[in-house]
Image: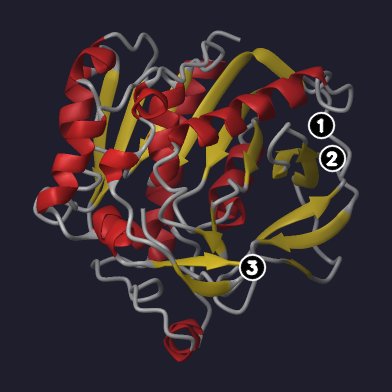
Amino acid sequence: MLQFLSTIPMVVGFVSACFASEVGVREITVAQPDRDLAVTVWYPATAGGKPVLTGDNKIFKGAPAATDAPPLPGRFPLVLLSHGSGGRVETMSWLATELAKAGFVVAGPNHPGTTSGNSTPADTPKLWQRTGDLSAVIDSMTKDASWNGVLNADRIAIVGFSLGGAAAMEISGARANLEAYASYCDSYGKWDCAWYAGGQGYVNDEPVKVDKVDLRSIDKARFEQSNLDRRIQTAVLVDPGLAQAYDAQSLKEIGIPMHFINLGSAETIPLAVISDRLAKLTPKGTYATVAGATHFSFLPQCKEGGAEFLKSVGEIDPICADEGSRPRGDLHAEIIGLVKDALVRDLKASQ
């Protein structure tokens, strides 16, 4: 759950129309009473549409797709994406496009209050808002005539990264314990805990001074409530946040497959996201690590000069400086394989 690229909004960059794409992409809006959601949808497509690079900007390489390409005939499982704290769903394009090629409709919202350029410490622990966003996307897409003929609404999954992994935990049935989380931050001064104590947020792409967050002042009832959405049938959780805060009994009661992926090895995975214990507590949990990776390895591949640009705008996190021993493209290939295999096994094997 780190803040990154707070001053650099993700964009969709146009490229030459000389390539053919198997992936369509659309931007939709999902209206809610208190917050409208900008949602990106990737889907299996036939030829057509306008070629784009989703998530392309000064820092990151984009992933090829085609805007408004005709959907491939058929009905496909729905995979929800939830991005990390201070991120955007477009930064997951490298994964989303590969899942679309594998026969999934993939949809992810940008979560207000924890999105790049509009992210505050006070909004970060409000997981009930994120799970509400994700359930609203399911509601909208399964009822919308534009999508309900493309989706197999009986097969829905969630893939979450970092704070998005925490949202995926909770929508799958995990419940968090406020005192456990506050006690963890009493003694751990890094990652999410440092963000709460830092006194800075981002609004309208500008840094702003904010009060430090007293976790014990959070609405306890809402923080600890169940956010289970029974339409979710399987979950993939990459470096999930709040790893020290979940109620053990709630994990033991989760009835769906939970596939945990940590980036790195046992000695390098941060306490904030280490999840081998979580996998053991869930009845259908699996656990895998990606050797040579770091938390930032989940971000898109960086362009030449990206690291220097980040330094020039004051970004301190090693977003482009892979500390592991393997190229980010190789790490992405391994992560894609783990995610895709889990989703195919759980959602498509018996179709």
Q: Residue at x 84, y 40 (%)?
A: 46
Total count of labels: 3
Q: Do the residues under discs 2 and 3 have CB atoms within 8 angstroms?
A: no
Q: Say left or right for 63 vs 299.
A: right
The mark nearer the N terminus, 2 or 3, is 2
- Residue 204 badge: 3
The mark nearer the N terminus, 1 or 2, is 2
Q: Residue at x 43, y 20 (%)?
A: 172
> Which image quarter holds the C terminus?
top right
The residue type indicated by label 3 comes to Asn
For mark 3, does the 10 Å Cα neighbourhood hold few (<14), some (14 to 19), or many (20 or more) residues?
few
Q: Which residue is mark 2?
A: 46
Q: Which residue is mark 1?
A: 72
The residue type indicated by label 1 comes to Leu
Label 1 residue SS:
loop
Within the image, what quadrant is residue 127 found in?
A: top left
The residue type indicated by label 2 comes to Thr
